[in-house]
Image (cartoon, rainbow, N blue to C red):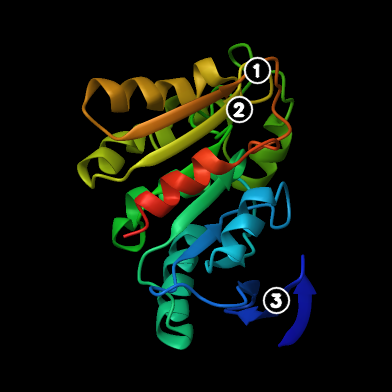
Amino acid sequence: MTETLWNGFKKIEFEFEGRVAIVVFPEKANEDKNWLFKTEYFGAFPDFEIEMLKRGWHLAFIANKTRWCLDEDLDLKARFAEYLHKEYGLYQKCVPVGMSCGGMFACKFAAKYPEYISALYIDAPVMNLLSCPGDLGIAKGNMLGEFQKATGMTMSELICYREHPIDKMHLLLENNLPIMLVYGDSDDIVPYLENGAILEKYYRENGGTIIAIGKKDCGHHPHGLPDDCTPIIEFVEKYRK
């Protein structure tokens, strides 16, 4: 185990079941020891996470085998969440923070293991693999080769695939999981129309709790709300139980 500072906060890094695991500690934990679970790209666009650390939240991460969301990575996350609860006393439920491919992890993890989830914050999430990485619509990500190498899936198999995050929306809704969704309206890597908008429409039509914030003239990056992340903070604080 190694201990360093991350944006002024104590960070420990260690191995959990052969993967790199990270926990960042607030100076003073809030009453319930709530925590954020960054599902991919640790350290990327951290403004919101830093603000939550200042408010007494913990931040955790465990490395994935691939960013394309294998079931083994979802199962590992569940075991890691249980470990953090038992070893460090963190709250039994977390708020996944999922950006881009991390949004796919967040949704599929929440659908498979809702008992570990308070609410979700997803940002330009990959929800439809035919869009990204498939590029069968308006997406221009050019990541299909990487996806196929990571998963072994052919294009024919992808067309017939029924385990996209959008195929899990009913499970998120059935478990009453609130969602904060942020996106750029000019994103051509993970276009909102083909991804997040499907989730937003489904939740609104079926009585789910969702807040969707679009950023005008913004592409896939930057993630978050760089000028003021207050809406995200207020959302996760409201639904942290």
What is the quadrant of the C terminus in the image?
bottom left
Instruction: Determine whether, in the image, residue 98 is placed left or right of residue 226.
Output: left
List the residue tagged with mark 1.
139
Residue 69: in sight, yes or no? no
First-in-chain label (3 vs 2): 3
Q: Nearer the viewer, residue 17 or 55?
A: 55
Label 1 crowd bin: few (<14), some (14–19), many (20+), radius 10 Å: many
- Which residue occupies 55% across, 33% down? 126
- Which residue occupies 76% across, 70% down? 8
Q: Amino acid at mark 1?
A: Ala
Tell me whether circle 2 and circle 1 mark residues in contact (CB < 8 Å): yes
Q: Amino acid at mark 3?
A: Lys
Up the image or down, 145 lies above or below 98; here it is: above
Q: Quadrant of residue 61?
A: bottom right
Query: Which percent across, then down, holds residue 13?
Result: 70, 78
Q: Which mark is drawn over residue 11?
A: 3
What is the quadrant of the N terminus in the image?
bottom right
First-in-chain label (2 vs 1): 2
**Secondary structure found at label 2:** loop
Label 2 crowd bin: few (<14), some (14–19), many (20+), radius 10 Å: many
Query: Which percent across, then down, holds residue 175?
Result: 23, 47
